[in-house]
Image: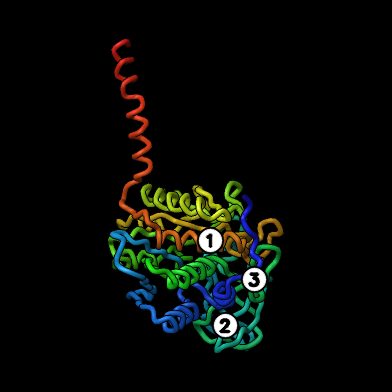
């Protein structure tokens, strides 16, 4: 059955989050939002030594030996203001994966003391050449002076809806963060639920917040980690076809039993919720935080929603553009999170359903295998 189209307008948490300024190492505005969110709801709010945020929520008695920890990142590829080098000229650092040819002439905005200040990229260093080298700094013609350390983003309006999609300055991974908060609000109304929610910093430069969290064991050891992403749509993983269970990324495959657990919970959910659809794919467009969690000894997998104009690159028109996601994919992602935090089937580090299937096959053909062996 086709998924139900969203009729009631987008999740207010999503609209709020997609309106906030953020950039790698400059995630303070999103963190302030999380802090207020927790204060209002009297939820725990902990930070580790890297400034990653951990929220733990439990309703009812302790049920899970291995609760799920959802992990999303707070930043998006962007600029961080360095210093004014002329009355209307700003030098800024660039952090994240956007190809050099997209920069010069593109419009940007910096958030400083409650206001957006607009500008245009004049030049970049190293300059765009045929051989792709990552951009490090940009010189920007700017409308007014900008304070050092202010975050800068591409100049697009607050979120807008077109069809069933929401377009924003940054969906990656602010939409993932919004989905996690939305899940928390739904879990608060449940009698029995448990999950951890980790919000990491500076993913876009190579998930250094997640590496630090994994090293410091910010996530309790017993958790099964589910990294949450928006990930570039691929020919076989399209926008609107449902949230995606990631079996791996560009660098590694994730813990098979953790992936199998998410798959099992999704199947159970699809049986009771006819509007829930999902996909299971290898999303090898980039490397995500699950790789770090796996390498540091956690059982980890990933869930994501397909993203249009990944990292603001409209590759058809070859210009900077808003990112977009499908609102029904988003809603189904939240439902999947809720199911994982409330499921009656618990994670045990094994793929119990697969083991059962293999045992049944073995039993079914055991006699035949033995008898035929004698005739060989
Ligand atoms: Zn990204």
* Lower sequence index among marks 2 and 1: 2
Furthest toward the top, the residue is 375
> Can you see residue 86?
yes
Q: Which mark is residue 230?
A: 1
The span from disc 2 to disc 1 (Cα, nearest Å) is 24 Å
> Can you see residue 128?
no
Q: Residues within 10 Å of mark 1 (few under 14, many from 20)?
A: many
Q: Mark 3 near ligand 1 (CB under 8 Å)?
A: no
Task: Determine the image quadrant of residue 192.
Answer: bottom left
Which is nearer the eye, 214 or 268? 268
User: Where is residue 247 shown, x and y percent of the image?
Assistant: 45, 49
The span from disc 3 to disc 1 (Cα, nearest Å) is 20 Å
Seen at 57% across and 86% down, the residue is: 146
Q: Mark 1 near ligand 1 (CB under 8 Å)?
A: yes
Is the residue under label 1 in contact with that under label 3 (CB below 8 Å)?
no
Task: Determine the image quadrant of residue 351.
Answer: top left
Q: Quick one: SS at disc 2?
A: strand
Left or right: 40 in relation to 368: right
Q: Residue beneath label 3, please?
A: 9
Is the residue under label 2 in contact with that under label 3 (CB below 8 Å)?
no
Q: Which mark is residue 111?
A: 2
* Lower sequence index among marks 3 and 1: 3
């Amino acid at each position: 059955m086709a998924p139900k189209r969203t009729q009631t307008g987008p999740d207010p948490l999503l609209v709020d989050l997609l309106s906030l300024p953020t950039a790698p190492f400059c995630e303070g505005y999103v963190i302030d939002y999380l802090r207020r969110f927790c204060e209002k709801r009297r939820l725990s709010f902990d930070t580790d030594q890297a400034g990653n945020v951990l929220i733990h929520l439990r309703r009812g008695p302790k049920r899970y030996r291995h609760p799920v920890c959802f992990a999303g990142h707070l930043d998006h590829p962007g600029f961080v203001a360095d210093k004014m080098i002329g009355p209307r000229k700003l030098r800024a650092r660039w952090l994240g994966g956007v190809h050099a040819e997209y920069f010069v002439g593109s419009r940007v905005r910096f958030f400083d003391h409650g206001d957006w200040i607009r500008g245009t990229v004049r030049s970049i260093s190293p300059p765009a050449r045929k051989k792709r080298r990552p951009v490090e700094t940009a010189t920007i013609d700017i409308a007014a002076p900008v304070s050092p350390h202010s975050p800068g983003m591409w100049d697009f309006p607050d979120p807008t809806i077109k069809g069933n999609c929401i377009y924003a300055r940054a969906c990656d991974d602010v939409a993932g963060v919004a989905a996690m908060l939305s899940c928390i609000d739904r879990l608060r109304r449940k009698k029995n639920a448990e999950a951890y929610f980790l919000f990491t910093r500076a993913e876009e430069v190579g998930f250094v917040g997640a590496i630090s969290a994994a090293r410091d064991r910010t996530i309790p050891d017993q958790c099964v980690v589910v990294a949450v992403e928006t990930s570039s749509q691929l020919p076989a993983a399209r926008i609107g076809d449902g949230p995606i269970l990631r079996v791996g990324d560009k660098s590694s495959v994730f813990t098979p039993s953790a992936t199998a657990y998410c798959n099992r919970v999704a199947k159970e959910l699809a049986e009771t919720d006819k509007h829930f659809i999902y996909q299971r794919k290898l999303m090898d467009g980039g490397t995500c935080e699950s790789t770090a969690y796996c390498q540091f000894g956690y059982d980890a997998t990933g869930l994501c929603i397909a993203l249009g104009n990944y990292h603001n690159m409209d590759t058809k028109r070859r210009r900077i553009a808003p990112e977009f996601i499908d609102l029904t994919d988003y809603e189904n992602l939240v439902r999947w999170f809720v199911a994982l935090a409330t499921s009656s089937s618990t994670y045990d580090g094994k793929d119990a359903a697969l083991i059962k299937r293999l045992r049944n096959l073995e039993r079914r053909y055991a006699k035949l295998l033995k008898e035929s062996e004698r005739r060989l």
